Image (spheres, grey):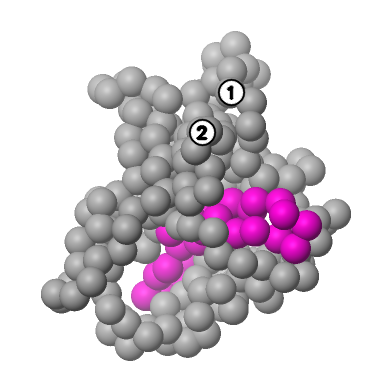
Amino acid sequence: MALIHRATIVPTKIDLLRQWVPLQPWAAGIDAGTLEVVDAYRFDDPDGEVGLESHLLRAADGTILHVPLTYRSAPLPGAETALITTMEHSVLGTRHVHDAAHDPVYLATLLRTVLTGGTQAAFEYSEPGPEREVTALVHGTGQAGADVPDVHAPSIDTRGTDTVVDVGTAVLTLHRVPLDDPADRDALVGTWAGRAHPAVLATAVLHGTAHGG
């Protein structure tokens, strides 16, 4: 479950994304001067400590961008370059916002979701009130019960609009621009508001497999 608070946040998520995304190497060549929110989905941190949220944004040229973030109560040790900013949350206090590609909690969760056929987290609300309609639906293409290796310190590379993350036991590729064509490997696929045909958001290849090298 992803616990949703009815809170105010400063700066807003879209404001920080509008500042950060255009500066990223994977956004080069994309007109990201204006970004609009399309949708978002969350994963569940089993320990309940790290917020795991992936944003789907529309750039000025119509390109859809996939931007996973993590929210922590303190900076991620040893990942200073991954810290985007801090934001003030009216319930949780100061939250440290990171590029999720550097965060081992996100990477472990993504790998598990992909390999075991998991899905996005369901929403649980901290207090009564209107509930959001869930329109972003994602799932892994793997099989329930599949073995999931541990995640080690990530090594990160940018290849075009992809962020490629080697976690020692596997290579995870975040497609910052979701792919239309089906993946030839285990993947995270999804639909969202305005998108009925599943797109590929990320892939995973275990070391030692045909694609893993």
* Residue wearing tag 2: 198
Of discs 1 and 2, which sits in the foreground?
Answer: 2
Tag 1 and tag 2, C-beta contact below 8 Å: no
* Residue 92: image tag: none
Which of 196/44 is in front? 196
Which amino acid is tagged 1?
A: Pro
Classify 65 as above or below 165: below
Query: Within the magenta stretch, is there residue 69?
Result: yes
In the displayed structure, 134 sits above or below 189; it is: below
Compared to residue 180, the image places residue 177 above or below, namely below
Q: Is residue 173 left or right of residue 118?
A: right
Q: CA distance from mark 1 to mark 2?
A: 8 Å
Q: Quadrant of the C terminus?
A: top right
Q: Residue shown at 42%/78% (left/top)?
A: 95
Q: Which residue is mark 1?
A: 182
Q: Residue 7: image x %, image y %?
A: 32, 82
Image height of 200 relative to 71, above or below:
above
For residue 147: magenta? Answer: no
